[in-house]
Image: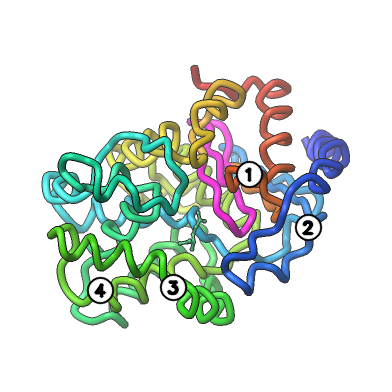
Amino acid sequence: MNNLLKQVIDENRKYTNYGQVASYIPELKNAKRSDLGICIIDKDNKIYTAGNYNTKFTIQSISKPIVLAMALMDNDWTTVFSKVGMEPSGDPFNSIMKLETNDTKKPSNPMINAGAIVTTSLIKGSSLEEKEERMLQFFRRLANNDSIGINYEVYKSEKLTGDRNRAMAYLLKNDGFIDGDVEEVLDLYFKQCSIEIDCVDLARIGINLAMYGIDIESKERLISEKVSRMVKTFMVTCGMYDASGEFAVHVGVPAKSGVGGGIIATVPRRFGVGIYGPALDSKGNSIGGIHILKDLSEELELSIF
Ligand code: GLU
């Protein structure tokens, strides 16, 4: 497996030349475009790695399925889905348009920014600090890594420039989809996006989702089977921005990407995959990462369909 991973990294690194590092959050511009790394953890807890697998980067939108899991564990589902929908939007992740044109004005799903800001607002805690601590602890347990924390440079950069998210959040508050202090919700959202991880952390979260919420090391249940199914279904239908359909056809596994260049993929009862490649394609997905997953899907027959 290690040889296969080295091979797919070497063969697909050329694609990084055709992608761009995200720059709309200024701090993300510092990433190295040619970086490409991968980690796979299998159901027997064997860890395979290649390339820049231990480079740290911010989780960005890959936090969305995790925070959705938290929102579903903290609230009854009727409440959650009265505030966020279940349908792919077909629009870019940061689109504001449907918040006005949808009949209900409800965000289409929890994998786009508007929907994710709603799920963030549903995290329980008596103060912002408690919510932040609970959130970080949940990520640490899922990744089995107590050292996971926030990259404050990225957080500050996003908070300073996140006016589009701010606009969406105020609209959502106006329409009754978020309660409480909008700036606090945004602060928590910017922090969740700025959580710093590497490919091994993502692969670990991926295998725990692949095992339907049971930690492969401690055998402890971290997420209920029902919640893990729900989260993975959203990853299939909406996880890869407005290229989710194409990704399902070519790769066929639940996955989520982020503008920091990460991709998490989870292959039921088999593998957790973490990829890092900050050169993004026009849809916002890691360009090298997508090519790697296509190759691995063929090689290891990963598609669930
Ligand atoms: N923090 C980013 C934003 O809200 C996340 C975007 C992404 O990774 O898709 O714009």
Which label sits on residue 182?
4
Residue that numbered label 2 is attached to: 33
Q: Amino acid at mark 4?
A: Val
Q: Amino acid at mark 2?
A: Arg
Residue 173 located within the stretch drawn in magenta: no
Q: Earlier in the sequence, mark 4 or mark 1?
A: 4
**Left-right relation of 297 to 196:** right
Are the residues tagged 4 and 1 within 8 Å (C-beta)? Answer: no
Quadrant where the image shows the N terminus: top right
Who is closer to the viewer here, 98 or 126? 98
Are the residues tagged 4 and 2 within 8 Å (C-beta)? Answer: no
Real-space Cα separation, disc 4 to disc 1, in angstroms: 30 Å
Which label sits on residue 282?
1
**Left-right relation of 116 to 271:** left
Q: Nearer the viewer, mark 4 or mark 3?
A: 4
Residue at x 31%, y 34% (from the top left corner) = 87
What's the magenta region? 256-272
**Left-right relation of 137 to 57:** left
Q: Which element type, helix, strand or loop, lies under badge 2? A: loop
Are the residues tagged 2 and 1 within 8 Å (C-beta)? Answer: no
Q: Earlier in the sequence, mark 1 or mark 3?
A: 3
Q: Amino acid at mark 3?
A: Lys
Real-space Cα separation, disc 2 to disc 1, in angstroms: 15 Å
